């Protein structure tokens, strides 16, 4: 698998784009590993940061219970 963001030539990941961020979250609300998502190391770190920011400003829930 190739990195989703490298294929689309996206330089930055927007934390307000919850539709894209939800692709990289498990059903429980946890961030999926890079082995499951197929992201490169750089974009996996950026996804984790974007998800955490979106959670803090209440765009994404911390858990899906």
Image (spheres, rainbow, N blue to C red):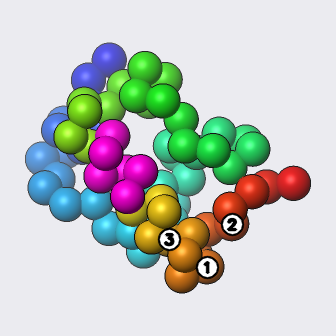
| Viewport quadrant of the N terminus | top left
Q: Residue 43, located in which quarter of the rendered image? A: top left
Vertical side of 41 occupied by 21: above or below: below
Q: Main secondary structure of the magenta part?
A: helix
- Residue 9, percent from left and from top: 12, 47
Residue placed under numbered mark 3 in the picture = 54
Answer with left or right where residue 47 lies relative to residue 2.
right
| Viewport quadrant of the C terminus | bottom right
Mark 1–mark 3 Cα distance, whole angstroms, equals 6 Å
Q: Residue 35, located in which quarter of the rendered image? A: top left
Residue at the image position 41 percent from the left and 51 percent from the top: 48
Q: Which residues are magenta?
A: 44-49
Mark with earlier residue (2, 3): 3
Q: Is residue 21 magenta?
A: no
Q: How many C-alpha atoms fall within 10 Å of the one at disc 2: few (<14), some, or many (≥20)?
A: some
- Residue 32, percent from left and from top: 53, 35
Residue at the image position 33 percent from the left and 40 percent from the top: 44
Q: Is residue 47 magenta?
A: yes
- Residue 28, percent from left and from top: 75, 44
Mark 1–mark 2 Cα distance, whole angstroms, equals 6 Å
Identify the secondary structure beneath mark 2.
loop
Vertical side of 55 occupied by 1: above or below: above
Residue placed under numbered mark 2 in the picture = 61
Residue placed under numbered mark 1 in the picture = 58
Mark 2–mark 3 Cα distance, whole angstroms, equals 8 Å
Q: How many C-alpha atoms fall within 10 Å of the one at disc 3: few (<14), some, or many (≥20)?
A: many
Residue at the image position 79 percent from the left and 55 percent from the top: 64
Which mark, residue 9? none
């Amino acid at each position: 698998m190739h990195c989703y963001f490298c294929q689309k030539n996206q330089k930055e990941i927007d934390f307000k784009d919850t539709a894209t961020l939800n692709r990289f979250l498990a059903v429980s609300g946890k961030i999926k590993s890079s082995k499951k998502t197929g992201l490169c190391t750089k974009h996996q770190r950026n996804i984790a940061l974007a998800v955490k920011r979106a959670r803090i400003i209440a765009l994404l829930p911390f858990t899906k219970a």
